[in-house]
Image (cartoon, rainbow, N blue to C red):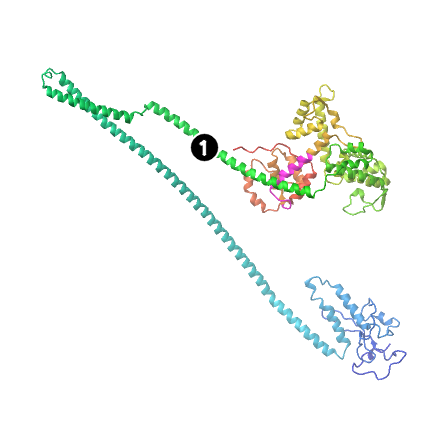
């Protein structure tokens, strides 16, 4: 090992002696080590690192002559361990990196790993390891120390200048952000003012349009009144003319009568016979002329007033005319209504035609692209039991149900062939009763055994309701089959109930076990069926097990007052009372029996189908009342109001249960109920309540949670008022 005082060599002085074949001597060693005592400003420490020269007195020219890289040693720079290791200076110079370079790289890599460079706040610290490496170079290479120090100082000055510039620009950036916010607020204020002005102008426009319509209506009414006045004026004018002519005629008649009376008085006087005959002839002539004139006037009067009727007849005819006019107005109104209905029917007819054409084209497309209906008779030779068993399984089922039956038959065969099940592990998504690693035995029980086991589990569940259902199920299997066999039976029962979905007992137990249905749904459904059977037994006064058609229908209507007439008829048909059936009585006990494999009769199955359909209808009506999309959020108050609207008979306890299930909060933490009497007052405060923090959940999650619970209508909805 060379003396530490002789470790610095002149970089420009070449080696004068030739290179020995045995290697470099101890005095000619290019490696040296020392400890650096100067401390760095940021790191508060100083580490000494060895450094390396080439054999010719210059820095090592690696990697020009290196043929490969050695594995970096995981050690600190300038450690004594690297100096004490044997052969530290005997590595071939042409085959590996210089040791000093390796140590610097290791040191730099470690320092960088200690820094969190993912955030902006540590970007300044990233230069610290590089400063230390540079300081190592400055301290170890004395010859280049002034130049390297000047380079470092120049870069440090430039970095300080840049940092100062950044600090001076920070207030400008904040001021720019403030100005931007002010401008945005001004823009929003201007938009709000414009909206207010636009709304005011729209309201003024609507008022002016209404005023114009009102003026037009007044104009039309005035024109109608003027026309009526003109007509009445013309009638009055004609009447006055007629009265004037009649007055003149009457005055003439009075004058003629007065003249005749005077003539008769003269003729009856004693001195008339002694008058001149010429005068009498002339008087006779004048009298005849007057008679002719009067006769002509009489004819004129008959011609003019021959069609005049008495006032009594005129009033009767006028009353009749008025009645007929009223009837005509009523018929005109009816005619207009019929015309409107005819137009609406025409539009409906056109829409129906379009739908018919669309459905016809869709039917043709479906007929063209769809596959033919399957021939289910081919399954007779595949299903175990032959044609007789297949006919029993397929009786009264549609294609979708037949597919489920066929899948169950196929799955049952595959399940019988499987001897072991693979454990699902201990993940969070794995149910508690299935958490196991390894393989478990398939016990291969019969369907009857599984159904009896599930019924026993339900009976024990009534006495142990404190545990969760999954934990209870596993503890039940441990009590029944022992702790060692419980996990095998758990996998076996789970695979069976997951497969046989058409079996009522298995499908309902699977739904409760997997959390798709609450226990209360199954319990309440069984209680409903039991109560219905009890009602039928009470109605059977003779205790013969028989009910008439009328008794059966009356029991269904009284027990299910909210069911429609069509649903009652469906239950009657499911019980065996078809329109073509002439039976008078029915044995109602057979309606509630089950097969050995747990399959219920069609009547009980129809009750369950109607229960699920009524729940879906109730939830659809609730969603329609809320008027929200599935991805939108609904608050507790809105849901409460919607439930009370669609189901006014809902009591507070049931309402609290629905809200607790929908929002997954205890009933004790629910806010106060809405008071029906103060509903109008609280509606005015609803806008202020919206600003407060309230519970809000997506509508889709609310409906899914209510679907798992025993959600149903309590009473009929209030009928809408008729116009």
Q: Quadrant of residue 388?
A: top right
Point 29% across, 32% down: residue: 238
Is residue 568 placed above or below 135 in the rendered structure? above
Q: For the point 55% across and 42% down, which residue is it? A: 685
Look at the picture and state if 480 lies above or below 134.
above
Instruction: Please tell me whether the stretch drawn in magenta is mainly helix, strand or loop.
Output: helix
Residue most toward the right? 22
Query: Could you tell me which secondary element the residue under label 1 belongs to?
Result: helix
> Range of the magenta residues?
611-632
Q: Which residue is drawn at the image coordinates 66% and 73% (left, top)?
A: 157
Q: Give how far across and how far down residue 721 sits, in percent.
A: 54, 33
Q: Position of residue 449 (x, y in %)?
A: 83, 34
In which quadrant of the rendered image does the N terminus lie?
A: bottom right
**Residue 558 or residue 8, whichever sits in front:** 558
Q: Position of residue 544 (x, y in %)?
A: 74, 20
Which residue is denoted by mark 1 in the rendering? 332
């Amino acid at each position: 090992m060379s003396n530490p005082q002789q470790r610095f060599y002149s970089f420009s002085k070449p080696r004068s002696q030739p290179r020995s074949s045995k290697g470099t001597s101890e005095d000619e060693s290019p490696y040296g080590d020392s400890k650096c005592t100067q401390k760095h400003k940021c790191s508060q420490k100083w580490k000494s690192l060895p450094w390396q020269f080439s054999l010719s007195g210059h820095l090592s020219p690696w990697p020009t002559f290196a043929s490969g890289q050695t594995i970096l040693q995981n050690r600190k720079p300038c450690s004594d361990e690297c100096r004490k290791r044997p052969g530290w200076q005997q590595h071939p110079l042409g085959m590996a990196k210089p040791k000093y370079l390796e140590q610097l790289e290791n040191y730099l890599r470690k320092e960088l790993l200690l820094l969190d460079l993912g955030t902006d706040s540590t970007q300044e610290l990233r230069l610290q390891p590089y400063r230390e490496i540079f300081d190592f170079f400055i301290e170890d290479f004395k010859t280049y120390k002034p130049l390297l120090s000047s380079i470092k100082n120049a870069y440090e000055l430039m970095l300080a200048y840049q940092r100062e510039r950044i600090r001076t620009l920070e207030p400008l950036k904040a001021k720019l952000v403030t100005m931007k916010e002010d401008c945005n607020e001004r823009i929003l204020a201007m938009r709000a003012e414009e909206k207010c002005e636009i709304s005011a102008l729209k309201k003024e426009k609507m008022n002016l349009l209404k005023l114009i319509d009102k003026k037009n209506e007044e104009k039309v009414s005035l024109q109608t009144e003027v026309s009526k006045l003109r007509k009445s004026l013309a009638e009055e004018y004609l009447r006055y003319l007629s009265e004037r002519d009649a007055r003149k005629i009457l005055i003439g008649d009075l004058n003629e009568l007065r003249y005749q009376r005077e003539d008769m008085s003269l003729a009856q006087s004693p001195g008339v016979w002694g008058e001149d005959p010429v005068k009498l002839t002339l008087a006779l002539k004048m009298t005849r002329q007057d008679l002719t004139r009067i006769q002509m006037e009489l004819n004129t009067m008959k011609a003019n007033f021959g069609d005049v009727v008495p006032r009594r007849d005129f009033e009767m005819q006028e009353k009749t005319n008025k009645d007929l006019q009223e009837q005509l107005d009523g018929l005109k109104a009816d005619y207009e209504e019929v015309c409107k209905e005819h137009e609406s029917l025409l539009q409906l007819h056109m829409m129906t035609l379009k739908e018919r054409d669309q459905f016809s084209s869709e039917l043709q497309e479906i007929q063209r692209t769809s596959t033919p209906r399957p021939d289910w008779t081919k399954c007779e030779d595949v299903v175990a039991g032959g044609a007789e068993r297949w006919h029993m399984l397929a009786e009264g089922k549609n294609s979708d149900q037949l597919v489920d039956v066929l899948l169950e038959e196929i799955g049952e065969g595959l399940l019988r062939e499987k001897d072991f099940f693979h454990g699902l592990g201990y993940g969070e998504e794995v149910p508690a009763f299935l958490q196991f690693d390894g393989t478990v035995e398939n016990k291969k029980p019969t369907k009857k055994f599984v159904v009896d086991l599930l019924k026993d589990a339900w009976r024990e569940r009534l006495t142990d309701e404190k545990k969760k259902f999954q934990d209870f199920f596993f503890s039940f299997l441990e009590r029944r089959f022992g702790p060692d066999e419980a996990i095998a039976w758990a996998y076996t029962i789970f695979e069976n109930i997951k497969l046989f979905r058409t079996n009522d007992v298995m499908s309902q137990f699977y739904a409760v076990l997997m959390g798709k249905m609450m226990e209360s749904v199954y319990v309440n459904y069984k209680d409903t069926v039991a109560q219905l059977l009890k009602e039928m037994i009470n109605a059977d006064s003779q205790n013969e097990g028989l009910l008439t058609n009328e008794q059966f229908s009356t029991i269904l209507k009284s027990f299910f007052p909210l069911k429609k007439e069509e649903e009652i008829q469906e239950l009657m048909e499911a019980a065996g009372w078809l329109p073509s059936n002439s039976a008078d009585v029915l044995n109602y006990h057979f309606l509630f029996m089950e097969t050995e494999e747990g399959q219920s009769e069609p009547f009980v199955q129809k009750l369950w189908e109607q229960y699920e359909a009524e729940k879906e209808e109730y939830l659809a009506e609730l969603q329609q009342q809320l008027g929200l999309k599935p991805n939108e959020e609904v608050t507790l108050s809105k849901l409460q109001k919607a439930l009370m609207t669609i189901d006014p008979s809902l009591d507070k306890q049931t309402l609290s249960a629905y809200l607790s299930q929908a929002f997954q909060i205890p009933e004790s933490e629910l806010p106060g109920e809405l008071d029906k009497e103060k509903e109008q007052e609280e509606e005015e405060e609803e806008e202020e309540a919206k600003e407060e923090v309230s519970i809000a959940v997506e509508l889709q999650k609310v409906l899914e949670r209510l679907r798992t619970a025993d959600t149903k209508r309590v009473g009929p909805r209030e009928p809408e008022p008729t116009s």
